[in-house]
Amino acid sequence: MRSGGMHVPGDPMSFTETTRTSWFSRLKSGVIGIFIGLILVFGMIWLLAWNEGRSVKTYRALVEGAGAVIDIDIGAVEAGNEGKLVHIAGRVDPIGTPTDSVLGVSASGASGLRRSVEMYQWVEEKKSETRKTLGGGEETVTTYAYAKEWRSDRADSADFRDGNGHQNPEMPISGERFTVERAMLGAFSIDGRAVADLGSDSVVPVANADLERMAEALGVTRPVKTDGQTIFVSADRQNPAVGDLRISFTREDTEAASFVGAQKGGGLVSYRTSNGRDLFLSSAGIASAADMFNAAQSENTLITWLVRVGGLIGLFIGFTLMLSLISIIADVIPVLGSVVAFGTGIIAAILTLLLGPLVIAIAWFAYRPLLSLAIVAAGALVGFAIFYLRAGKAKPIAGGLTA
């Protein structure tokens, strides 16, 4: 049940709302939570198992690629290398000029151009405090605060809890990226976006002579000014008003780059390994094939661990949802409910630490049976050696005591 809202005294930019939830409504939510938690747990089990398979397949593909790649000269395209995994490195020459056709800004010699747009607007921040009430219910006090900020994406004021006086206009233009269609590394043609992704950013200066054209393109009535780097659509940039804009441009320059991929015609495409994985590696500057594959292996390891951690967190949330009904029932007495909730949290953590590593271990065994058996065998040998050495030391001691 939601009660009426009220503005915080002395703060016209805040709005407070109190919501009360009965114990029976919470019981219903707890039952639903069991099913949601169950789905989440099974989803995380699948994610953890899939992640181990992805990691192993990527590792094997990179090992295969590292053994098959050949370094070639970028001066000429050799027909004999067609379809082979090749490594090229050298100076980048963009073909064409990235251009913002709307505002008429271009970056000659760059591989990419990025338009950044920010609008001064209202944003809503929500803060909630929940306390339990006698009888198992809950009371939640939510404070909605409103402030003006520069944001690159428009906050939809229609979704604000209190939209009165907090309306945001539509943005006449948004951020966008423009790249050349292709670039050349010697005789090889490379996708322009892949090259621009490796570029270093620098500001594109804006001249006062361009402002009239830009104002017409934007279709705005507010003054358009610049400090040489940023375009301000504002009557007073020192005291911006809602709807004011800041627009800037950065160019992406790529002087040299390195790529690993399958040679196809006069360019490079993804290379399909024997296990069905696609390989296409890129690096800014001049990098050896070995360094690029090592970097890719490190990235694969990082992704594997991030997904593992995310999967474990998901498992914990799933188990917590499945056990939440217990604490809700105990919330008839608020203090008892808090104690039970703490206990169910510990149980959820224990279940997570038991099931998560078990799923990872089973997936490891499924995808790396020989390595898993070798690790188990090595562990058994170490354990046997320790037991044997301890038993050997114990015999003389026992004999001395008998004498």
Image: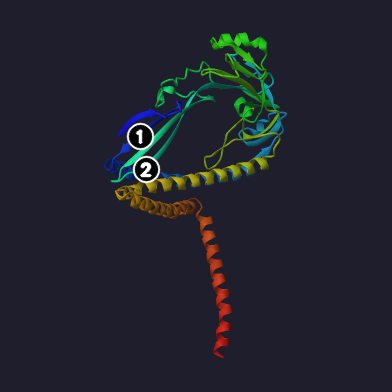
How far is disc 1 from disc 2 in space, using C-alphas? 11 Å
In the drawing, does residue 289 fall left or right of residue 363?
Answer: right
Vertical placement of residue 51 versus 77, above or below: below
Locate the N terminus and report the quarter of the image it occupies: top left
Examine the rendering and report whether any part of residue 136 can be seen: yes
Q: Which residue is nearer to you in this view: 367 or 216?
A: 216
Spot occupied by residue 138 in the image (x, y as percentages of width and height) = 33, 41
Answer with the quarter of the image where residue 179 lies.
top right
Locate the C terminus and report the quarter of the image it occupies: bottom right
Q: Amino acid at mark 1?
A: Thr
In the drawing, does residue 275 fall left or right of residue 135?
Answer: right
Q: Which residue is nearer to you in this view: 120 or 270?
A: 120
C-beta proximity under 8 Å, tags 1 and 2: no
Which residue, as the protein is rendered here, is positioned at the far bottom? 403
Tag 2 secondary structure: strand
Spot occupied by residue 165 in the image (x, y as percentages of width and height) = 43, 20
Vertical placement of residue 171 versus 47, above or below: above
Vertical placement of residue 209 versus 139, above or below: above
Dot 1 or dot 2: first in sequence order is 1
Q: Which residue is nearer to you in this view: 310 or 58?
A: 310
Examine the rendering and report whether any part of residue 57 can be seen: no
Crowding around mark 2 (Cα neighbors within 10 Å: few <14, some 14 to 19, many 20+) is: few
Residue matched to label 2: 131
Spot occupied by residue 262 in the image (x, y as percentages of width and height) = 61, 34
Crowding around mark 1 (Cα neighbors within 10 Å: few <14, some 14 to 19, many 20+) is: some
Which residue appears at 41% of the width and 54% of the height?
Answer: 346
Spot occupied by residue 133 in the image (x, y as percentages of width and height) = 32, 44
Q: Amino acid at mark 2?
A: Arg
Answer with the quarter of the image where residue 16 lies.
top left
Which residue, as the protein is rendered here, is positioned at the far front? 10
- The numbered disc on residue 18 is 1
